[in-house]
Image (tube, coloured by chain):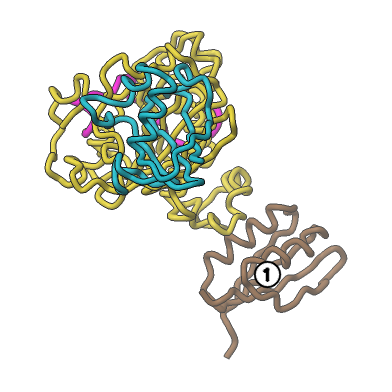
Chain colours: A yellow, B brown, C cyan
């Protein structure tokens, strides 16, 4: 009857097909989309959950870690998978949730040598990593490869999120020129984080990705949303492309591994 | 000149799938074309026309064509 | 009065999240001096290096990055809101 969807798909996606912003056309776009989630941890877990639920046709998941008990305080998709590689564990979860989603497992950490090759294959990238070096790597690779991506980072009750359309909007490096000296900014391991913080922001990342795929609504481009869950302050600040940004300007067009050891300064 | 007509038999289907399938069919047909939907689920007889109108299409008529059987005639809006 | 908001990353130093400071007509740089006076050298070390703001902490006045206003010379007026956006990397 409907060339695009099976009976099961119509039933599965009914709640979003009826939305004028999505419809059958939007659902088709989602099923054809290829999204890469780098990091299947705190941010990655909810992002993967909701992208899979929405029917994103191809989900790449990259993570070199194994599931540990301390992860389960926030990374709920790994329930029952202690010891398993996280990307693999995420695949198990997705397969149970939605067979429409093809998962490509990348059971390793993204680094300067592999980042461009991995991001190339996807339409949208989600930065769900947990360290500065990865964030600069992902930013630079995505801008060089022309891949829109969604950045988010958290600590304790606080988080930030912005979306980047390469060459058009401010990139992560436009805002944060290079990484802080090691040890100057606490990690979640040192200062802590709550499941609700990562849960919120990973979900927001998925929302941005869906909007980018469907070209609907307003995305957080040239903007950063910051949220402090302790005070419930949701603020949006304006960002601008930095004309001196070595990556956006195209001055640097390659990932040079030596540059990404600590400070990621270009 | 009569407009192109399409048909959708949704007997046995219930809300909200009656609207979902009507909506999907409307997406497939051309602007200004007609879609005749057959329903046998009473709540859908109100729900489908209302939902379809909220998306900007025109409901030409809703008629009972048998016992617990209705036809809803919709004209797809011009895009 | 200038409203200053501190992010989670600073509250180990400042204890408070939101304060009001008498700094109308002063520059952002002068506001920082007031804050360093109040919170001590730990805050200064976090924010400044060689007399300049460190690049991984951004300061916004009413939602606008001071880098695109007048930097540390940006003038503040009554009711302005100053926020710090430090780089965090957790995920």
Residue B51, position in %: x, y?
69, 63
Residue B14, position in %: x, y?
75, 53
**In the rendered view of the protein, which quadrant contains the C terminus of chain C?**
top left
Count residues near mark 1 (Cα–Cα under 10 Å), then give few for <14, some for 14-19, many for 20+: some
Quadrant hosting residue A41 = top left
Q: Which residues are magenta?
A: A95-116
Q: Is residue A74 above or below residue A150?
A: above
Quadrant hosting residue A208 = top left
For the residue pair B51 and C12, the one nearer the viewer reads as C12
For the residue pair A239 and A41, the one nearer the viewer reads as A239
Chain on which label 1 sits? B
Q: Residue at x 28, y 23 (%)?
A: A180
For the residue pair A40 and A255, the one nearer the viewer reads as A255
Q: Which residue has dot 1 on it?
A: B53
- Please check the rendered image and state whether residue A113 is part of the magenta-colored stretch, yes or no: yes
* Residue A155 horizontal side relative to residue B48, left or right: left
* Residue A161 horizontal side relative to residue A166, left or right: right
Q: Is residue B41 above or below residue A97?
A: below
* Label 1 SS: helix
């Amino acid at each position: 009857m409907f060339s695009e969807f099976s009976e099961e798909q119509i039933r599965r996606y009914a709640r979003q097909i009826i939305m004028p912003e999505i419809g059958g056309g939007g659902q088709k776009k989602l099923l054809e989309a290829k999204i890469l989630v780098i990091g299947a941890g705190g941010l990655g877990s909810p992002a993967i959950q909701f992208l899979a639920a929405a029917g994103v046709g191809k989900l790449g998941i990259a993570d070199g870690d194994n599931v540990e008990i301390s992860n389960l305080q926030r990374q709920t998709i790994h329930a029952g998978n202690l010891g398993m590689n996280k990307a693999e564990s995420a695949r198990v979860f997705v397969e149970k949730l939605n067979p429409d989603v093809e998962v490509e497992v990348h059971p390793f950490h993204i680094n300067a040598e592999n980042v461009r090759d991995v991001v190339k294959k996807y339409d949208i990238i989600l930065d769900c990593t947990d360290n500065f070096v990865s964030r600069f790597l992902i930013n630079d690779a995505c801008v060089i490869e022309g891949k829109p991506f969604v950045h988010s980072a958290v600590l304790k009750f606080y988080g930030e999120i912005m979306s980047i359309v390469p060459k058009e909007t401010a990139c992560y490096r436009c805002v944060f020129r290079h990484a802080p000296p090691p040890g100057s900014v606490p990690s979640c391991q040192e200062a802590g984080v709550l499941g609700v913080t990562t849960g919120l922001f990973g979900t927001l990342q998925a929302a941005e990705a869906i909007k980018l795929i469907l070209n609907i609504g307003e995305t957080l481009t040239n903007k950063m949303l910051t949220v402090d869950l302790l005070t419930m302050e949701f603020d949006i600040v304006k960002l601008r492309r930095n004309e001196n940004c070595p990556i956006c300007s195209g001055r640097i067009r390659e990932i040079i591994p030596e540059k990404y050891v600590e400070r990621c300064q270009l | 000149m009569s407009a192109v007509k399409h048909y959708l038999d949704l007997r046995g289907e219930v809300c909200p799938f009656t609207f979902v399938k009507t909506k999907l069919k409307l997406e497939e047909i051309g602007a200004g074309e007609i879609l005749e939907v057959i329903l046998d689920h009473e709540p859908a007889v109100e729900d489908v026309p209302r939902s379809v109108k909220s998306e900007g299409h025109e409901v030409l008529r809703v008629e009972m064509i048998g016992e617990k059987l209705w036809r809803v005639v919709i004209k797809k809006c011009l895009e | 009065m200038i409203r200053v908001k501190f992010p989670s990353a600073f509250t180990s130093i400042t204890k408070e999240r939101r304060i009001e400071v008498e700094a109308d007509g002063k520059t952002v740089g002068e506001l920082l001096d007031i804050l360093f006076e109040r919170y001590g050298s730990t805050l200064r070390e976090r924010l400044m290096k060689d007399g300049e703001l460190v690049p991984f902490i951004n300061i916004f006045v009413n939602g606008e990055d001071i880098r695109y206003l007048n930097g540390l010379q940006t003038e503040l007026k009554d009711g302005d809101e100053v926020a710090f956006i430090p780089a965090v990397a957790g995920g």
